[in-house]
Image (cartoon, rainbow, N blue to C red):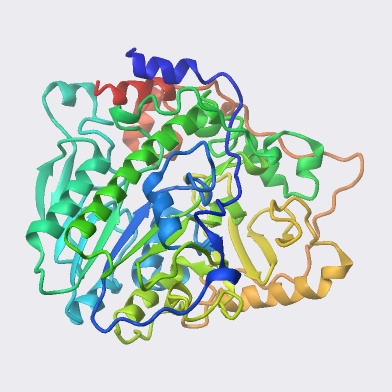
């Protein structure tokens, strides 16, 4: 074990996690005080869209003093911060498909992270191309069809299959490493060996395209899609020790208490001891406190990437001609309600960071509380480019909000409707549908024996007090149930999952003194870091059965801590 990994591992002995801090009054002012319209540009603007993976809505230095993100903080200081940015599906592939198509999952059809088709989908950069833009995609695609081949709509293409890898040999079997094999990138249809740390290498490709490959006479749209900070997060060597001695308090709702689970669905409590639960997350014995050290150290390389992009814009005097947008494909839970990761309709899962920067066009130092969905990105980018809106787009342009032409108080957002479709890979989270209108959020579940939920986010931002059976909210509950059902219909008026409109909680009562909740099967209770901890997510097959009959894992794994350590050392 090298000194870097040793320091990170030995330091993880206390339960930790995030603690949010107020925005700095010096760096970000309130929208009510500072939002004002800025003049429209007379020529096409360039756009750099930076998408990260699994970053919490509050996982930035200007919100938490423990985290060091100087370039992200600069965006908040010189641009606008949107604390109410949300995703319509908190899962990689559906969210990315929504961003690229301007459609919801029920219409674009990419409903989970398993292989699906992209047939018939048009990605919004294609419309920018038709308007004279040069476009580039660099990074993680991971949407629908699990290939890395170039997609229509992009003049430049750099990507990789699936989740990609942080280092050239991350995830490769020992034999392949010994034979000199590496992970590969797809560069304009050619297979190219990955040479270094993925965040840095993707930034190299992006900057090279900006400097040497694009036509400087045309406006550009760069879509830079990072792998970071997706699990298992591996920081670059320069940041491996960054948070070795830092601590982050856990959210209060992570504790296993009766008060924390009062009014919550059964599945929430039962998920504590699963792949996506705080007690057994990723089926390992690593604590969330230890994990977050890697998570935020990995984010530092993304922050460096932003710094390089800003330096390029400044050097070439493009800083006032280029809109930079920074966001994530979904949020990340670190123990809220005993849950980790994403997928749920709870705030830490659906909320994402959103920073918008363009000196002279986007108000500076503003916290704008208008709701923006990932569904709104495509129409916003076409609107700011003066491109007509395609008929299939479902969202609304947020450009009036971003530019300050419309204040947060005057902003009229569409309902925020959330959809998550049950995955056989991770069956612990049920199919989830939700709607937010104003400060009220209603959540219902598909195909499980459980309660639904209703929260007043203004009074209860941590979603601890379920109002679903409060008579004072009966009319709201009925109205939101009706609106949710209506809006979940696809463009042909169908409900793709065959379910009926819920009008009551249904017959869910159980007799006093009768049987309680069923126990999980004995074979599901295992020790941490089993060598086959990935196998339950891999599709069943004769090959998998043969391996298990022989007492062997199909996809061997080492303990999570050892996996991170070895990959960080390039072994």
For the residue pair 303 and 287, the one nearer the viewer reads as 303
Q: Position of residue 360 (x, y in %)?
A: 35, 72
Decide if residue 182 is on the left or right side of residue 230. Answer: left
Q: What is the number of callouts on the image?
A: 0
Res 147 seen here: no
* Image vertical order of residue 12 relative to residue 392, above or below: above
Residue at image point 78% right, 63% down: 506
The residue lying furthest to the front in this view is 26
For the residue pair 528 and 510, the one nearer the viewer reads as 528
Q: Quadrant of the C terminus?
A: top left
Decide if residue 455 is on the left or right side of residue 345. Answer: right
Quarter-of-image position of residue 431: bottom right
Res 46 seen here: yes
Residue at image point 19% right, 35% down: 196
Quarter-of-image position of residue 201: top left
Q: Position of residue 243 (x, y in %)?
A: 45, 28
Residue at image point 67% right, 37% down: 254
Q: Position of residue 34 (x, y in %)?
A: 54, 70
Q: Quadrant of the N terminus?
A: top left
The residue lying furthest to the right in this view is 512
Q: Position of residue 106 (x, y in %)?
A: 47, 70
* Image vertical order of residue 357 relative to residue 551, above or below: below
């Amino acid at each position: 074990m090298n000194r870097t990994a040793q320091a990170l591992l030995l330091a993880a002995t206390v339960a930790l996690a995030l603690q949010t801090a107020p925005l700095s009054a010096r760096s970000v002012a309130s929208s009510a005080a500072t939002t004002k319209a800025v003049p429209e540009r007379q020529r096409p603007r360039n756009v750099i869209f930076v998408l990260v993976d699994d970053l919490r809505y509050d996982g930035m230095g200007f919100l938490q003093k423990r985290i060091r993100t100087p370039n992200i903080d600069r965006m908040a200081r010189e641009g606008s911060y949107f604390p109410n940015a949300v995703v319509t599906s908190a899962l990689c592939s559906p969210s990315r498909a929504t961003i690229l198509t301007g459609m919801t999952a029920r219409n674009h059809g990419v409903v989970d992270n398993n292989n699906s088709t992209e047939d018939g989908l048009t990605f919004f950069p294609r419309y920018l191309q038709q308007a004279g833009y040069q476009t580039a995609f660099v990074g993680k695609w991971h949407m629908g069809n699990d290939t890395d081949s170039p997609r229509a709509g992009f003049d430049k293409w750099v990507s990789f299959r699936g989740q990609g890898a942080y280092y050239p040999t991350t995830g490769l079997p020992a034999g392949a490493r010994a034979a000199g094999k590496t992970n590969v990138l797809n560069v304009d249809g050619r297979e190219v060996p990955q040479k270094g740390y993925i965040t840095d290498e993707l930034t190299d490709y992006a900057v090279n395209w900006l400097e040497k490959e694009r036509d400087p006479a045309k406006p550009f749209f760069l879509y830079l899609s990072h792998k970071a900070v997706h699990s298992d997060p591996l920081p670059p060597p320069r940041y491996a020790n960054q948070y070795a001695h830092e601590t982050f308090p856990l959210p209060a709702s992570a504790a296993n208490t009766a008060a924390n689970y009062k009014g919550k669905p059964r599945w929430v409590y039962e998920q504590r001891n699963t792949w996506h639960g705080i007690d057994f997350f990723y089926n390992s014995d690593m604590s969330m406190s230890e994990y977050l050290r890697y998570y935020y150290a990995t984010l530092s390389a993304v922050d460096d990437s932003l710094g390089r992009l800003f330096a390029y814009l400044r050097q070439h005097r493009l800083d006032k001609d280029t809109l930079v947008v920074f966001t994530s494909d979904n949020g990340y839970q670190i123990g809220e309600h005993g849950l980790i990761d994403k997928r749920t309709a709870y705030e830490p899962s659906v909320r994402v960071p959103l920073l918008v920067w363009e000196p002279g066009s986007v108000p500076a130092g503003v916290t704008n509380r208008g709701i923006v969905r990932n569904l709104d990105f495509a129409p916003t980018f076409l609107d700011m480019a003066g491109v007509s809106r395609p008929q299939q787009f479902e969202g609304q342009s947020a450009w009036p909000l971003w530019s300050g032409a419309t204040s947060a108080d005057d902003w009229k957002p569409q309902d925020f409707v959330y959809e998550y479709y049950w995955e056989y890979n991770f069956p612990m989270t049920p199919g989830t549908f939700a709607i937010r209108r104003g400060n009220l959020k209603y959540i219902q579940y598909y195909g499980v024996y459980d309660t639904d939920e209703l929260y007043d986010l203004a009074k209860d931002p941590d979603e601890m007090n379920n109002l679903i059976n409060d008579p004072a909210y009966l009319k709201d509950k009925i109205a939101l149930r009706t609106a949710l059902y209506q809006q979940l219909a696809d463009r042909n008026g169908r409900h793709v999952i065959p379910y009926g409109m819920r009008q009551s909680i249904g017959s869910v009562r159980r007799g006093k003194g009768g049987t309680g909740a069923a126990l999980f099967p004995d074979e599901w209770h295992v020790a941490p870091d089993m060598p086959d901890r990935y196998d339950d997510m891999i599709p069943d097959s004769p090959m998998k059965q043969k391996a298990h009959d022989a007492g062997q894992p199909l996809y061997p794994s080492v303990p999570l801590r050892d996996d991170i350590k070895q990959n960080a050392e390039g072994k």
